[in-house]
Image (tube, rainbow, N blue to C red):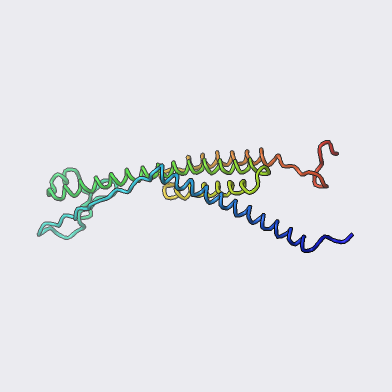
Amino acid sequence: APSANPGRRRGGERGRNMQTLFKLAYSLTVAILLVLFVILGTRTFYDEPESPTFSFRPVPEKPIGEGPGEPLYCDFDGRCFKGGREITPEEEANLRQEERDYIQEQRELNRRQREYEDERADYHRNVFILASVLGVAAVAAGLYLFRRVEAMPLGLVLGGLGVVIFGWAQAAEDFGEIGMAPLFAVVGVGLAIVLAAGYRFLGLVRPTGGDGGQGEGGE
């Protein structure tokens, strides 16, 4: 029998290629929009703590006749030093008024900075947990829809992965403050859900017909 029309065959191949490209573009669109939805939703409904603004008082000048040495300064823990030596409470009481005002202001600024860093760590932890939950849910939904809907499952899986990466990027700055235990717990739960969803939904796919599998009742 004569072979099929070559032009029709080439046209069919082009149509299938265009269909595949269209599905891939749709999947990427779903993934990108899902990631943007989570990022913009987080920025809109859950504001990041604002960094405190400081108006620094100049370091008090040394009195005329006082010997050389390091100027007055305070560290992040609230300890203050003068001349390279830590100031005791008794010595602080004997300082000039402008020096005592400077020390009080520095301690207040350090306190506000510590509060800001604690709030920022809490914010990044919460965003990480929220993004991980949404990302894992999107991946699980993609696995559920596999072989049921075309193109969309891949977009959900890629978008879910992007959302999880966003959560990690947010938390990376404060891993030390957040602690490894909550991060490990969230990742462990997410991994268990994804593995369970993959086993449950991808395990339903069975070869049909041909030599690669057996039909129902086959031997």
Q: Which residue lies most toward the left here?
A: 64
Residue 210 versus residue 64: which sits nearer the camera? 210
53 left or right, relative to 175: left
* Image coordinates for residue 12, horizontal then vertical, percent: 74, 58
17 left or right, relative to 67: right
Query: Residue at 46% of width from left, 48% of height from top?
Result: 39
Q: Which residue lies most toward the right here?
A: 1
Q: Where is 218 relative to 20, above or below?
A: above
Q: Quadrant of the C terminus?
A: top right
Residue 178 versus residue 54: which sits nearer the camera? 54
Residue 119 versus residue 175: which sits nearer the camera? 119
* Image coordinates for residue 61, horizontal then vertical, percent: 15, 57
Q: Where is 133 relative to 154, above or below?
A: above
Residue 21 versus residue 94: which sits nearer the camera? 21
* Image coordinates for residue 17, horizontal then vertical, percent: 69, 58
70 left or right, relative to 37: left
Query: Residue at 75% of width from left, 62% of height from top?
Result: 10
Query: Residue at 53% of width from left, 42% of height from top?
Result: 187
